[in-house]
Amino acid sequence: MTNELTSAFKSSLRGQLVLRNDANYDEVRKVYNGMIDKRPAMIAKCADVQDVITSVNFARENNMLLAIRGGGHNAGGLGIADDALVIDLSLMKSIKIDTTSKTIRVQGGCLLKEMDAATHEVGMTVPAGIFGSTGVAGLTLGGGLGYMTRQYGLSIDNLLETEVVLANGNLVKASANENSDLFWALRGGGGNFGVVVSFVFKMQPAHTVYGGPMLWDISDTKEMLTWYHDFISTAPDNVYGFFATLTVPPEAPFPEHLQLKKMCGIVWCYTGDMDEAEEVFKPIRAVKTPALDFVGAIPVPALQTLFDGLYPPGYLWYWKADFVKELNEKAIDVHVKYGEELPTPLSSMHMYPVNGFAGRVGKNDTAWNYRDANYAVVIVGIDTDPINKDKIINWAREYWDAHHPYSAGGAYINFMMDEGEDRIKATYGDNYERLATIKAKYDPNNLFRVNQNIKPRMAQAGALA
Ligand SMILES: Cc1cc2nc3c(=O)[nH]c(=O)nc-3n(C[C@H](O)[C@H](O)[C@H](O)COP(=O)(O)OP(=O)(O)OC[C@H]3O[C@@H](n4cnc5c(N)ncnc54)[C@H](O)[C@@H]3O)c2cc1C
């Protein structure tokens, strides 16, 4: 790449172009997962849609690897890559609410907490994830699981429209009525099809919910997980809870006698009538008195950011994941064993229910294929010290090896690191071929390949020029 070309590109942007010899390069190239240490050639901090178009064209014309960064939270660090041009959307955060149509339009650089703060002001929410620092873009394009999954579906089930910069540099809309094949693929197909510069979501009513964590001793895992499986399989949609094994953080507000103890727990979110919440939770509390019970009325944005402070950016994360249909006794025994062997205080296993509303959407209605799964399981080895890297990786791998035989095959793409093409195919199941065909139409040369990549099916005629 000549200096002239780079300078011309830089001066054509309204935003900033950060290069390797710039003082802020090391800061700007950081992503959330401290395990990822990539050195891109340049990072275009795009100020507007025109900057995104210019950057896509520059990468294509100069044969550069192209990465897209929304919130930078991706498990495998797929918002960045060595020697790539990174399209960074963090300056593009416009948010517009329409209270008449009950919709919100957000730009591709928004974080969940920014969208939540805006919807909360009008007593609404958009179903999304459980950490406020996650990017709306990456989370949504992969599906979007969270506290509202059982009541209102995945994020993609509430997505109405997107604006996308395609590999050829064209800006198009994708919705049920316009480029509907692209819209289908974007709902679960990740960053494979273009740079999504804006999303329009349907907002759902939820202002204050009844939620938070309940914890029991780790020795209660078998009993509580067995009960949880029976309960959540038939619970009304407005009762959500994800199961976890974890270590209690060594800080307030956690009681001292529980700090650094391994425990199992459920983080709840009840979206029904608040006057009935105590009654709804009476039988739950009666199953076994929790050792810690922080469940009560809580505004949605507070619940959605409850864990942000415990996991600031820069910690080392190693991820493994599976979808699960039936949770049998042997699988429960695996969770008991590896819950007791959590390798570091930050490491954890989360089992997110994906039934309820999300489970009633047809498996071919969007690219997100595992509508018949009951859970998305994620095993995360986490620590602050690189000295423990092998320890967290080995625990997560061994745990996953023991668990995988009881799983449904694929895994939620947003919880995967680099696991290769077969895992991606297993995840999309009978939607994969259609995705590969749509990929060939919109991105025949696989410009967008820093992602859980879907290879274009080249037999496809009619690729866009
Ligand atoms: C602490 C933490 C908590 C999480 N909690 C949840 C949760 O509750 N629910 C859940 O579903 N997931 C959750 N995730 C997973 C999360 O959905 C993924 O990590 C997701 O990829 C993050 O999106 P991002 O925009 O922050 O990531 P980035 O790293 O910026 O990008 C991730 C991927 O998305 C693509 N991408 C990003 N922006 C765009 C765009 N505008 N257009 C096209 N492609 C784009 C990129 O190509 C890349 O492949 C969590 C992750 C972390 C680290």
Image: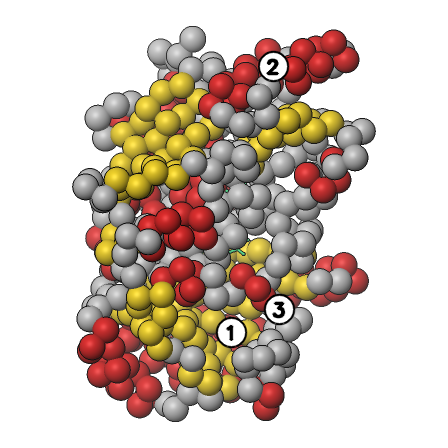
Name the disc covering residue 346, or none: 3
Residue 25 in sight from this viewpoint: yes
Give the CA distance from mark 3 to mark 2. Answer: 44 Å
Residue type beneath disc 1: Thr
Tell me which residue sits at (42%, 15%) in the image.
Answer: 170
The secondary element bearing badge 1 is classed as: strand
- Left/right placement of residue 312 relative to residue 147 reads right
Question: Quadrant of the image for the C terminus?
Answer: top left
Tell me which residue sits at (60%, 88%) in the image.
Answer: 256
Residue designated by label 2: 12
Q: Vertically, is 416 above or below 355?
A: above
> Which one is earlier in the sequence, the residue at label 3 or at label 1?
1
Q: Vertically, is 159 above or below 436?
A: below
Please provide percent x and percent y for residue 165: 44, 22
Along the line of sight, which residue is nearer the eye, 270 or 99? Answer: 99
Q: How many numbered discs?
A: 3
Tell me which residue sits at (39%, 91%) in the image.
Answer: 289
Residue designated by label 1: 245
Q: Residues within 10 Å of mark 1 (few under 14, many from 20)?
A: many
Give the CA distance from mark 2 to mark 1. Answer: 50 Å
Give the colour scheme shown.
Answer: secondary structure
Along the line of sight, which residue is nearer the eye, 30 or 463? Answer: 30
